[in-house]
Amino acid sequence: MRRGLQIVLISAIVFAFYYFGFGVVGKTAGTIVSIFSTLTVISLCFIIFMENRNPSTTLTWILLLALVPIVGLIFYFLFGQNYFNRRKYDKKALRDMKVYERFEKEELRFHQDLTQFTPRQQQMLKLSKKLARTPISFNTETTILTNGEQTFSNLIHELENAEHHIHMEYYIFRADDIGTRIQQILINKAKSGVKIRFMYDAVGSIQISKSFLKEMVDAGVKLVAFGSVKTNFFSSRVNFRNHRKIVVIDGDVGFIGGLNVGDEYLSRSKTYGYWRDTHMLVRGEAVRTLQMIFLQDWLHMTGEKLFEQEYFSPTLTSGGDGAVQMIASGPDNERRVLRNIFFSMITSAKKSVWLATPYFIPNDDILTALRVAALSGMDVRILFPAKPDKKLPFFASHSYFPSLLDAGVKIYEYEKGFIHSKLLIVDGEVATIGTANMDMRSLNLNFEVNALLVQTASVKKMVTDFERDLLSTNLVDLDQLKNKKLWERFMESAARLMAPLL
């Protein structure tokens, strides 16, 4: 019997005895089980305390276990086992480190001149290089794609021109119109001899049908579900998702950003309406790193090693502007790469910090950094959806707004539709774009991938797009927040308590 199912059954039995321990069994049995469950909760609280987690996270878990023991126990076994979850990804971390070391040795053959950047930008690049251990490229072209139409038209064009291989990795892949169209391209390419490897997240793409996948497999597409939970949904692995969106074609062209594959990303959903998102097309040297990240995930799930030269020979572009670095982050990396890079970007700003995110649940460090930047007189702006797609994170996000507004941060609610872009722009010269939201889940639990851009034309395009997006927003007023209805404030405060778990 699977561990998750055992947990549920045991918890149900404990619950029954705890509250209904009388009659045939007698009150003594109920008392024994009550004592047992109490000791279990106390033991787990002690374990959590000794793990030296973030204080707010520790208190959240202890309160949850103390106030609602049965629910707390279930949640802990699903989401809270730091030790066991770290052990789960130790092997992946060790394998990834060997690949990083190989790339570092190759990189040492080339001198990288950082003098074209400001001292603060040089520090940022050195830090990101040390944290992520991925190379910084000066021979890469990037193009910002500002909506679904631009993204999928470019993606389809490049897929149709693939000659050697297509590597694709998505959190959500739907079997709707756009998903079926891409599926048929992959099938046709596989039949023509192109090597296709397709990875999807087992939870994010849980609605994808077996027949849809079988059609691809029958055509020769190799596919795998990341973190399968079909036989054991009540497992801690359900909490660690592959949120990455990566496409690599022939080692020359790559795609990265916020868009999954689904009709809603083309603004075809009545629920969401217009979908504002940002993706990026990459050509040249930095595609090698995207390839490496994909192949590491593929190795983790399949055991297949594919680090041959045929997958790492992109057509190098000359004269690429600025610096480009692809950064992978996930529970297999204790350095919490993106969380530290976001913090460093904010604290290094001299003029402005602009952030766009569909979910805003920051840790204390990033929250303080944003407030201090605004109090220092910098132009700090947050672009956030006016309407939610998920209510609990939406309420939790709003709980942070009063303190930010009080410090001088300007918060804009996007009203044209739903904004799903994940951007951080500093001083109009340094930016990051990718899959990571500014929330606890992306910063601590999910496998994510972002691109760091320094002094590239793409950063300027992101600035222009951000300014255009502001034309479709409402500026949040602090007085309006203070005058909210009591039930709204209660919901925000309650959701805030769950913030470390979201």
Image (cartoon, grey):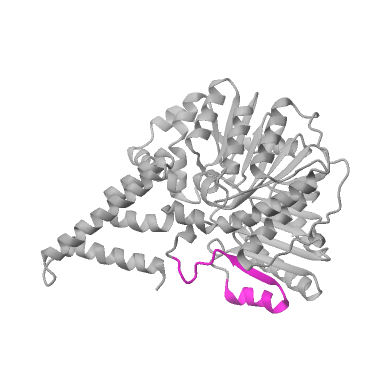
Residue 179 is situated, as x and y percent measured from the top left of the image, at: 66, 65
The percent coordinates of residue 27 (x first, y second) are: 11, 64
The answer to whether residue 148 is visible is: no
**Which quarter of the image is occupied by the N terminus?**
bottom left
Left or right: 67 in relation to 179: left
Above or below, comparing residue 194 to residue 443 in the picture: below
Residue 48 as seen in the image, left or right of residue 474: left
Q: Is residue 216 magenta?
A: yes
Magenta stretch encompasses residue 111: no
The number of numbered discs placed on residues in the rendered structure image is: 0
Is residue 439 placed above or below 248 in the rendered structure? above
Classify residue 413 as left or right of residue 20.
right
Question: Residue 76's spot in the image, x, y percent?
Answer: 38, 54
Residue lying at 36% horizontally and 68% vertically, measured from the top left? 6
| Point 65% across, 63% down: residue | 299
Magenta-highlighted residues: 209-233
Q: Is residue 502 above or below residue 297?
A: above
Write down the quadrant of residue 323 in the picture: top right
Residue 349, how many percent across, how many down? 64, 27
The residue located at (44%, 40%) in the rendering is: 54
Residue 301 visible to the viewer: yes
